[in-house]
Amino acid sequence: MNNLDSVTVIAGHHHDHAGGHAHSHHEMRFAPESGKGHHGHSHGPPASQSKLFWALLFTLTCLLIERIGGVIAGSLALLADAAHMLTDAAALGMSYAAVRVALKPATERLSYGHHRWQVLAAFVNGLACTMHEGTDFMVMRASLAMSGRDVDARG
């Protein structure tokens, strides 16, 4: 039996569960291959997974409606907002995928499991937001410079 077959943790604590049961733990066992939690039953997928899925679905629906409305109305503003929502949907999709992958059990090679994907997704999302804001700022400065107006950086 290797060290990943089961892990015993001494951590006396108490917590409640949905479904009307509560209990204390003094010695907990975790068996990664079972896919079950520290005391023999699974708590199901994390709430964030469901919320991310519905947020992604809602965002994609709004994106589609805005895209269709923008084409029908000939509205560049609606089309631009639909493009913006595409970046939002990409971020939500990446986060949703990372949460799903993180549910995979730990292995001998990945003793921490697949939780690193959530950290990587957060980093990429943050980097994308930073680059997006930097691009927006450069476009704004260029637009103001081309308009012939002076830009007052003092506010």
Image (cartoon, rainbow, N blue to C red):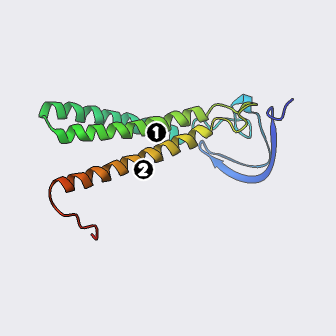
Residue 154 position, x and y percent, is 28, 71
**Circle on res. 52:** 1
Q: Identity of the amino acid at label 1? A: Leu
The tag earlier along the polypeptide, 2 or 1, is: 1
Is the C terminus in the top left, top right, bottom left or bottom right quadrant? bottom left
Identified at 31% across, 50% down, the residue is 136
Q: Position of residue 152 (x, y in %)?
A: 24, 67
Dot 1 falls on a residue whose secondary structure is helix
Q: Tell me whether circle 2 and circle 1 mark residues in contact (CB < 8 Å).
A: no
Residue found farthest to the bottom: 154
**Which of the two residues, 12 or 129, is positioned nearer the viewer here?**
129
x, y percent for residue 35: 69, 31
Residue annotated with mark 2: 130
> Of residues 12 and 134, which is closer to you in this image?
134
Picture quadrant of residue 91: top left
Is disc 2 surrounded by few (<14), some (14 to 19) or many (20+) residues within 10 Å?
Answer: few
Q: Which mark is in front, 2 or 1?
A: 2
Residue occupying image coordinates x 18% and y 35%: 70
Residue at horizontal 62 percent and vertical 40 percent from the top: 116
Compute the Cα span from label 2 to label 1. Answer: 22 Å
- Foreground pick, 143 / 3: 143
Left or right relative to 32: residue 69: left
Position of residue 34 relative to residue 52, above or below, is above
Image quadrant containing the N terminus: top right
